[in-house]
Amino acid sequence: METGSLTRQQKLRTLCRDFCRSAYRFVFPPACPLCHDEVDAASREVDGRLVTPVLCEGCSAEVNPPLGNRCMRCGIPIGPFIRSEEGCSTCRNLSYRFDRVIRLGIYDGLLRDACIRGKSSHTQPISAALANLLWLSERENLEAVRLDLVVPVPRFWTRRLTQSHHQAETISRVLAQRLLVPHARTLLHKTRLTPDQSELTASQRRKNLRGAFAVWFGHRQISGKTILLVDDILTTGTTANECAKTLLKAGAKRVVVATIAVVPPYRH
Ligand SMILES: [Zn+2]
Ligand SMILES: [Zn+2]
């Protein structure tokens, strides 16, 4: 009797949920935040959970072409059949403190355009949709890491005055929600404003960021933990490396990087 009533309750709950979702879709027809075309409603549900916002099929295929072989350590494309557990010819001699990079694609074409457009506050859904796509395409790799915390690469507080949207934070929040892992938004801090990295050489970049990050209040929170460090774009890996170094020094066991796009070395 009790089982029957529970089943009825469950059925009622499912009916209510389906009705609410249909009503929501009717009022707010799902649209791709990049091209504004309609999104197939079925593509928004995974394991009974509504995944939103998402890109349309056309944009998804363009920003996330067939995987191809990539370096397990730094994420750049490498030739077929090349093993890269210990890194590729580009990164093998670089002393990265993070274990590996999990990424969506290459910083080029529509993905580059999406990363640039996602930086402003009113295009936040673009960043969230890219994060959802990263989760959908790399879910197995992300879950295999057995994460304890998700942490965004921080920016210096004065940047909030000039940049209303922090893309890394939006991406890390979405990933934390999807992976059901706590989002430690303010765990890592940037301690000073640093000059733009784009004009600097590799050694200048390292010097520029040395000691620029800190864990102020949270050593107990990260001791022995595996952390997913999230940034929107990974260029040389210097920023991610400096953040990883700071987290490990504060007691973290392991740092894995997740990013939307990597910039291959020939485009730096
Ligand atoms: Zn689209
Ligand atoms: Zn590599």
Image: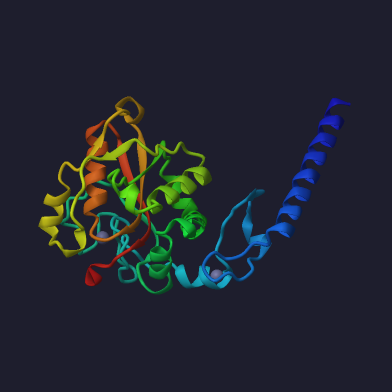
At 23% across and 48% down in the image, what residue appears? 241
Camera-nearest residue between 125 and 235: 125
At 51% across and 43% down in the image, what residue appears? 177
At 82% across and 34% down in the image, what residue appears? 9
Name, please, the residue furthest toward the right.
1
Camera-nearest residue between 83 and 174: 174
At 67% across and 48% down in the image, what residue appears? 48
Quarter of the image where the N terminus is located: top right
Quarter occupied by residue 255: top left
Q: Quadrant of ligand 1?
A: bottom right
What is the basis of the colouring in this image? rainbow
Q: Position of residue 88 (x, y in %)?
A: 24, 62
Q: Is residue 32 left or right of residue 69?
A: right
The relative height of residue 195 versus residue 10 in the rendered view (above or below) is below
Q: Is residue 175 left or right of residue 189?
A: right
Camera-nearest residue between 45 and 192: 192
The answer to whether residue 211 is visible is yes
The answer to whether residue 130 is visible is no
The relative height of residue 78 versus residue 16 in the rendered view (above or below) is below
Q: Is residue 221 left or right of residue 18?
A: left
Q: Position of residue 57 (x, y in %)?
A: 58, 69
Quarter of the image where the C terminus is located: bottom left
Q: Position of residue 206 (x, y in %)?
A: 14, 52
